[in-house]
Amino acid sequence: MTALLGTPLRVGRHQLRNRVVSPPMERNYGTADGRITGRYIEYLRARATGGAALVFTEATYVRPDGRGRARQLGAHADHVVPGLRSLAGAVHAEGALLGVELNHAGRVADPAVSGFQPVAPSPVPFRDRRPRELTTGDIGDIVAAFGAAARRCAAAGVDVLEIHGAHGYLIHQFLSPRTNRRTDRYADPVLFLTEILRRIRRAAPETTLFLRLSAFEGVPGGLDTDATLALARRMPLDLIDAFDISAGCYEAGEWIVQPGEVHRGVLAPHAARFREFGKPVGVAGRITTGEAAEDILLSDAADFVAVGRAQHADPAWTNTTLGGRAPRPCIGCNQGCIDELHTQHPIWCLANPATGHVVAAPLPGRRRVVVAGAGVAGLEAARTAALAGHDVVVLEAQAEIGGQFRLAAALPSKLEFGRLLDWYAAELSRLDIDLRLSTVADATVMSQLAPDIVVLAVGGTGLRPAIPCIERPRVADVREWLSRPRPLGDDDMLTVWGADRAGVAAADAAATAGRRVLLLGAERELAPAAGPREKVLPVRRLTGNPRVEIRLDTTLEGIDDERLLIGHAGERRWLDVRGPVLVSQGTLPRTIDVGRSVRRTIAVGEAAQAESAAEALRQAAAIVF
C-alpha cells in the first residue's frame, strides 16, 4: 500500500531516502534572537529518527524586520550558525537531510514582535496596519540578506534551502497583484524572486534549492492557479531543483493549514499542474495517512509529500506508515499547532500531549492501576500507566469508549476526531489493557479489583444556571441532546444557549442538518476559547446561514413553554421561540465513591475541571505512575 512512498528520490544534489518530507512549521521553540535550542534539536531529531527523508526547520527570517514570531528561528546573523550546525549533525546522524526555509514576512510581520515597522512592495494595509513601501535600495538590501542567510546555512551543513514564495509573505506579496502596485521595475512580479534565486545560487552553490509557492491565494483579486502557473513560466526555473506546492495567504489562512473537515490531499490536483516544468514536485495539504500519501504519488500529482501536522502528532509517522501500521493520528483540530502559534507561545498537539515535551520517567515498581472512565483522558492515562509497566484495568459505564470526545467526532467540523479513538482502541489491545465496557466504577467494584492507584476520568455534568424554569421539559444539556436528539416540529427552532466551543459546534451541526437555529450567549464572539483557524469554517457557515440567528452579548434570564426572556444592552424582552433549548454553560466535575482502601486517587479531565480535550490529555499524560 505504501510501496512508492518508501522509494528513494533524487532531487538536485541530494537523494531522499523516501518520499516523506517534514515540511517547514513554525514552532516558537527558538530563542528571542533566533537561535536553535535543545528543545528544537530534539523535536527535529525525533522526526529524523522516525524516518522522514528531509526535515525542515521553519520559515526562517533573513532580517529582523521580517520576523513574525517571538521565538522564530533566524538566519540573519552569524550567531545562529553554531546552533544550526548542531542541528545538522543531529539530523544527519539519523540518516535524514536538513532543510531551512528562508523567509521575510513583509507586511504581515508584527511590529510588536519584530520591533520594526512592516515593509512591503506597496503600502497595502494588513489588519488595519499600513506597511512602509520598500525603496529600490531597500529591496537590494533584502536580496543581499537572503544571500547572506543562505551562506550561513550552507556553512552550518544545511542540505536543502527552500525559498518561501507562498502564504502571503514578502516574496508572495511581490508576486500578487493585490499587494504589488508598484510602477517601477519591481512592478514585474517575478523580478524580486529572480534576484533572490540568483543571489542564493551564488552564495550556496552546493545546496539543493526548493521553491515554495501557493498555487492560489484563496481571496478575491488574488492569484489563482492559472495566474500562478503563468508567473512560474517567467521564473528562472533553471536555478531551482523542485517545487513545494501549498496554498493560501494570511487573509485565507484556512488554505495554509486546512481544518480537519477538508478532504485529504486537497491540493494534489493543483500541484499536478506544476508537472509541466519538468521539475520534481512536492505537495502539502491534509496528507495525514499513508493511503492519502500513496494515492498522491500513484496519481503522479507529486513526487514527494510534505507531511507536517501528521508528523507533529507522531514523530515516527514515516516508519510506522511504511511498516503498515497506523500512526498516532493528526485530527486536524488546528488548536495546538497553528492557533497556539499566533499567541506567540510554543506549539503543542491535542492528539499527542508529548509533542515538544520531555516525558517524565515512571516510578520504580509494578502496581495495579484502575482507570474509571474511557474518554480521552482516561484512555491516555491507561496507556501512560501501561507503558510504565503497570497492570491496568479500564472501567467504562457506556458500551463503547470515547465519552464526550465520541460525541464531538460525530459533528461535521470534527469528523477526524474518531481516528484518535480508533488509535486508542488499538493501543489498548496492543498493550494488553483490560477494558471493561458497560461497567460502572463504584466502591464495590474497586474493592474487588483492589487497585493501588485509581484514576478518576469520569467526566463532568452539564452546568444549569439557576434561571426561572430551567427544569422545563424543553431544556436539555447540549451533550445529552447530541447523544439522544429529539425530533423537531415544523415550527420549532433549536435554541443553543452558550456560544462557547461546544455550543458553536452543536449549532453548526444542527444548522448543517437543515434546522432553524437560535444561538445566543453572553460571549462577545463565537467560541472565544477557540482560535481563528480552528473555528473558521463553522463560524463562516453559521454567520452565512439565513436560517441561523445569532445573538451575542446576550443573557438568557427566563424560559416558558414558547418564549425566552433575554437580556441585552441593559434591557429585557421576551422572544417567541418554540422548540428545544440546549444548555452549553460549562460542566461540573463528577465524583464517584471508590471506597477507603485505595492508596492513591488522581482526577483527570472534566473530573479535574479540565476545560478542553487538550487540557484533559495533558493532565493524563503528566501523571507519574
Image: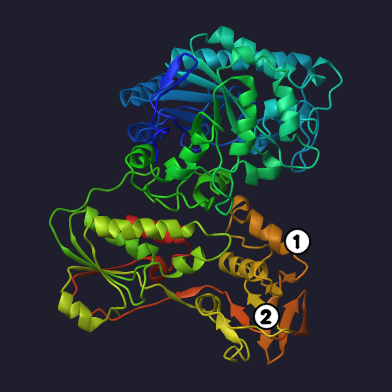
Left or right of 563? Residue 371 is left
Front position among marks 1 and 2: 1
Q: Earlier in the sequence, mark 1 or mark 2?
A: 1
Question: Alpha-carbon neighbours of circle 2 within 10 Å: few (<14), some, or many (≥20)?
Answer: many
Residue 12 is tagged as none
Rendered image quadrant of residue 272: top right
Residue 504, position as x, y percentages in the image: 62, 66
Residue 556 is tagged as 2
Residue type, numbered disc 2: Leu
Quadrant in which the C terminus appears: bottom left
Identify the residue at horizontal 37%, vertical 71% (top origin).
Answer: 400
Residue 544 is tagged as 1
Residue 331, compared with residue 112, is above or below; it is below
Residue type, numbered disc 1: Gly
Residue 138, position as x, y percentages in the image: 73, 17
Identify the residue at horizontal 70%, vertical 36% (top origin).
Answer: 216
Report, in whole angstroms, how far the alpha carbon at label 1 lies from the one at label 2. 24 Å
Q: Element under label 2?
A: strand
Residue 478, compared with residue 313, is above or below; it is below
